[in-house]
Image (spheres, helix red, strand yellow):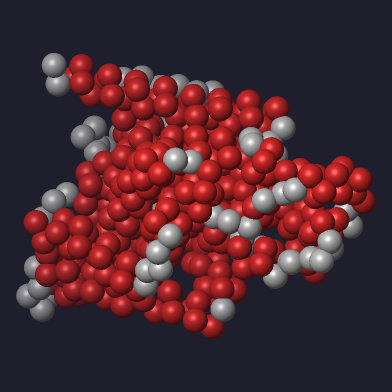
Amino acid sequence: MATPTTQSAAVRTRSKLPRMRSSELWYYFGPAFVASIAYIDPGNFATNFDGGARFGYKLLWVLLWSNAMAILIQYLAAKLGIATGRTLPQSCREHFSRPTSIGLWVAAEISALATDLAEFLGASLGFYLLFGGWLTHYGWSKTEILLGAAVVSAVCVFAILALELWGFRKLELGIVAFVCIIGMCYAVEMFFIHPDWHAIAIHTLIPTIDSKSIYIAVGMLGATVMPHVIYLHSALVQPRVQSEIADTPRRQYLARARHLRFETIDVFAAMNGAWLVNSAMIIVAAAAFAGRQWQNGMSIEEAHQTLGPLLGGTSAAVFAIALLCSGLSSSTVGTMAGQVILEGFLDIKFSIFLRRLLTLIPAIVVIATGLDPLKILILSQVALSFTLPFALVPLLLLTSRQQVMGAFVNRRPTRFLGWLTVAVIVSLNLFLLWQTLSSHS
């Protein structure tokens, strides 16, 4: 927590920050890219492909504005972690009453469980799409293949998590590699289609929505502005924060201000990269599937099966590889977020591997009971949108408090944009609730 001495030092040195050097920039790249994997997870595959198939390019604007909100939110999460040296859950436990902290923890756990469910299902589906046809010839049923894929996915996630045993930087680079693979897969997909770039530009810039598209639009919002990585990002910056301990308030401020400047670039690059991948998903779905009678939605399996005849076997294989990489990496990130939430709010130590084992249960149940993975994925994203305010409001309250942030406290324009973001999200959720209730009345 900043002291008056720190604040006065910040005022004197605000204009004396050293210039950023490109060699330093690469050291600070990583946390936002780890967070960005949650913005291109299997939930995004489900909502983006369903939205593109049913409504063409009309919902591209949702991704643009969701990305703008994601940039602001992830910047604030990183700033809180850098300025205070604590994660968002730890700060909530320190500055809010115990009943409030417990309530926030419950909402955070709901978002983490919904995320784990979507991401683990995605990894299992990725394995199924790649190897299911081959295993079917040996007499395996779809449920048996998915259950086997779930076990293999769990082993892979444990292996990825084990990278942290060799240092946090190794795990960061591993996740960044997955982000790059997913991006390359969709770069390849774009070569197979012939999109209408004029329509893409119009629908990216001009919002259009109606009662039919509101449900999937809110799902896309929940899949893009992810609550669990708001908590996680404040923790991802901590290894670097802990290495920047200085002997005077002035040097401490300079170190953290420089860190924040580098992290701002990291956030901007990572979030815009995720936005381009999400947009490519909708564009591919709209170009390949629009007008093919998907009014009631389509499953990811159907999308994969249709891509082959339409765009060739390579396109279908690339789609499956991207989904698999997305599921494995985002499942790893979801497990990390769950651990940050549990340890931060409850002040306990909990094994990240045990956390992963516990979060396997809901996904195994869904697979074993034969529920439609697409419907579960989209439902989980809508649930995430409803839990977003429980992460956003505490973040805005804390980063707007002088006694918490010191010289890094939010300025008036940032506070305005932050509360506007919350208002937009809550308004969309209320509209969705009204639409759902009225359709069943």
Residue 284, horizontal then vertical, whole percent = 42, 46
Residue 216, horizontal then vertical, whole percent = 33, 34
Q: How many marks?
A: 0
**Residue 439 visible, this angle:** yes
Classify residue 406 by image quadrant.
Answer: top right
Q: Residue at x 36, y 45 (%)?
A: 102
Q: Nearer the viewer, residue 343 or 233?
A: 343
Q: In the rendered view, would you say 394 is above or below 209?
A: below
Residue 313, horizontal then vertical, whole percent = 34, 63
Q: Residue at x 39, y 79 (%)?
A: 159
Q: In the rendered view, would you say 366 is above or below 158?
A: above
Q: Residue at x 50, y 38 (%)?
A: 394
Q: Residue at x 67, y 63 (%)?
A: 241
Q: Quarter of the image containing the C terminus? A: top left
Q: Nearer the viewer, residue 10 or 50?
A: 10
User: As drawn, is 359 to the left or to the right of 325?
Assistant: left
Give the farthest residue toward the bottom. Answer: 166
User: As drawn, is 208 to the left or to the right of 133?
Assistant: right
**Residue 281 visible, this angle:** no
Q: In the rendered view, would you say 293 is above or below 173?
A: above
Residue 362, horizontal then vertical, whole percent = 20, 58
